[in-house]
Image (cartoon, rainbow, N blue to C red):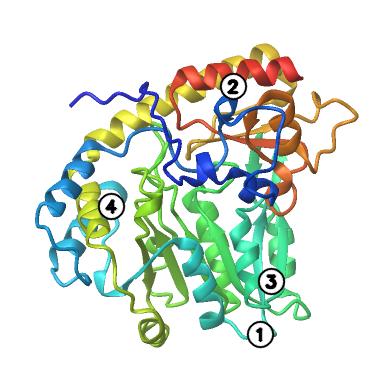
Amino acid sequence: MKYNFDEIIDRKDTDALNYDGWRQYIFKADKDAQFAFADNEFIRMWVADMDFSTPPEILEAIKARLDKKILGYTKVYDDEYYQIFKDWCQRHYDWEIDPREIVLSPGIIPALNRLVPLLIKEDESILIQTPSYTPFKQAGDYNSRQVIYSDLLEKDGEYSIDFVDMERKIKDKSLNIKLFILCNPQNPTGKVWTEEELIKMGKLCVENDIWMISDEIHCDLLRNGMSHTPIAKLFPYYEKIVTCMAPSKTFNLAGNLMSHIFIKNEEIKKEWLRLYDDFISPLSLVATKAAYSQCDEWLKALRNYLDDNFKLVQEFAQTHFPKANFKIPDSTYLAWINLTKYLPEDVDNQQLSLYFANKTGILLEGGNMFVSNGDNYIRINLACPRSIIEEGLERIKNAL
């Protein structure tokens, strides 16, 4: 089937966070707050959902379910659902999962908020690697747990783990770290950690009896030639690993509100199910089944299109912003760009989103939105038609 990723889809008046909720989310402003550009003049390259159509196979599955005419209380009762997802993990990651470990969550963000108090006590701390997806820190804040940062190292656009710093903090009894939240592939940098790096991080946690939550939501969005290894695959007998996966990023199903949380520890899983054994949307159920059983071809086409989008940005950066040292990330559809050498001196690097919104009419996320260690960076979403990216890049060039 031929898929059209160049299609411009009007998202106005759909109550989409991307289109209608940016004032409240990015700027904590009122929905009527005025900016230098009109709503229809903005280019939206910020939140991590796509401006591509959800795969037609999924839309057809939803339509077929609607034809059954009743949308009643729903849970997963048919084992086919778990078999479909098991086959997906086997096919894409050579990972033999145990479906009995899976609990469902309306998203990974609520899962993090739920997991933290189940895994660690109030006087115990969380370790995250920065720059970081902000909900990692917020999960600690929400539950009154201290969050400790370990900065990733960066050289010429390439990121690596500071294992010396990580080990020192884990072994520091005064910090009392009992949970490590890993992001693989990493957001916002797009780095896919190697098996060697995962084993080294995992061993640090195992040897110090530390819980791990591995957010692997971007694992399907690899560049061609890259591969992803779930950390739980490398430590199959360590019960203190919780893996988080979802179809939301992969298939543009963020509104589907259905994520898979692998909990090995029986006591923790039992407590989760006691507290959070939610009903689900019948439309979400059929959408997820269709995604994991019918959309391999669509995902392959998406990856090819995203690869070309990243090549476009790389060529543009090399021509106009060579000192940014922009490197195409291993995964995600998010470009993480260092503008240290190009930002005007009078620009507040803690307000880059506001600067670009008013100066260029582009909605993007400044590095300050990623907890720490992201000053002077911007994150832009490339999961949009190429014509939109070309216009956005021209606006950024003209502003700088």
Q: Is residue 96 left or right of residue 332?
A: left
What residue lies at 39% left-to-right and 79% top-to-bottom? 276
Amino acid type of the residue that numbered disc 1 sits on in the rendered structure: Glu
Alpha carbon separation for disc pair 2 and 3: 42 Å
Q: Residue furthest left?
A: 68
* Secondary structure state at the residue bearing disc 2: helix
Alpha carbon separation for disc pair 3 and 1: 17 Å
Q: Residue furthest front?
A: 32
Q: Are marks 2 and 3 in contact (CB under 8 Å)?
A: no
Residue 87, image x and y in percent? 20, 55
* Secondary structure state at the residue bearing disc 1: loop
The answer to whether 211 is drawn above or below residue 184 in the figure is: below
Among numbered discs 1 and 2, the one appearing first in the sequence: 1
Q: Is residue 228 left or right of residue 350?
A: left
Q: Is residue 329 left or right of residue 31?
A: left
Residue named by callout 3:
170
* Secondary structure state at the residue bearing disc 4: loop
Say few, some or many: other residues with alpha carbon within 10 Å of mark 1 (under 14 / 14 to 19 / 20 or more).
few
Alpha carbon separation for disc pair 4 and 2: 38 Å
